Amino acid sequence: MNTKGYLKEIYPVLPVKDVTEAVEFYVKKLGFKLAFTDTTDAHGYAGVSRDGVEIHLQWHDSVEWVKGVDRPMLRIYVENIEALYLEYKTQDVFHDNTSLKETPWGAMEFAFYDLYGNGLTFSRSG
């Protein structure tokens, strides 16, 4: 029998300096729900989910954070991007240059950073 491996899901892990604070940001500002946690303090590991997306948040000691090093960037494909943009616009999470725009390849998207500089791009295919 020739069975091929099948990639089913992916759970990106973002580094954070405070798991509790990061969970609060994703839940209160971005509408995620706490999926699980292995701790109730700043250290540890937790997962948050919204719709079909789950993101894991992992504590990293501040000595591991190097200034100037790029943080991870997630691209999350969404439906009703205009409604999501308006929802997040009211949550004080955008930076000065955040806008909903059409890309040269025909997608609509907007992007901003979480509390720890991890990039979040929300996109709708063109």
Image (cartoon, rainbow, N blue to C red):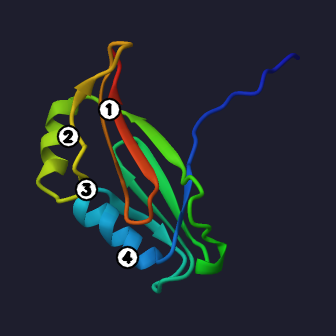
Q: In which quarter of the image is the N terminus?
A: top right
**How far separated are the C-alphas under marks 3 and 2?**
10 Å
**How far separated are the C-alphas under marks 3 and 1?**
14 Å
Residue type, numbered disc 1 = Val
Q: In this view, does 5 lie to the left or right of 119?
A: right
Task: Provide the secondary structure element on which disc 3 rests.
Answer: loop
Circle nearer the N terminus (4, 1): 4
Q: Position of residue 99 (x, y in %)?
A: 21, 37
Q: Is residue 8 left or right of residue 35?
A: right
Residue 31, label in figure: 3
Figure quadrant of residue 108: top left
Between marks 3 and 4 in the image, the one whose residue lies nearer the viewer: 4
Q: Name the residue under label 1.
A: 78
Q: In this view, does 101 lie to the left or right of 116?
A: left
Seen in the picture, residue 121 relative to 46 is either above or below; the reply is above
Seen in the picture, residue 71 relative to 110 is either above or below; the reply is below
Neighbor class of circle 1 (other Cα within 10 Å; few <14, some 14-19, many 20+) is some
Task: Provide the secondary structure element on which disc 2 rests.
Answer: helix
Q: Position of residue 90 (x, y in %)?
A: 11, 54
- Residue at horizontal 25 percent and vertical 56 percent from the top: 31
Residue type, numbered disc 2 = Leu
Circle nearer the N terminus (3, 1): 3
Residue extending furthest toward the front:
68
Neighbor class of circle 3 (other Cα within 10 Å; few <14, some 14-19, many 20+) is some
Residue 84, label in figure: 2
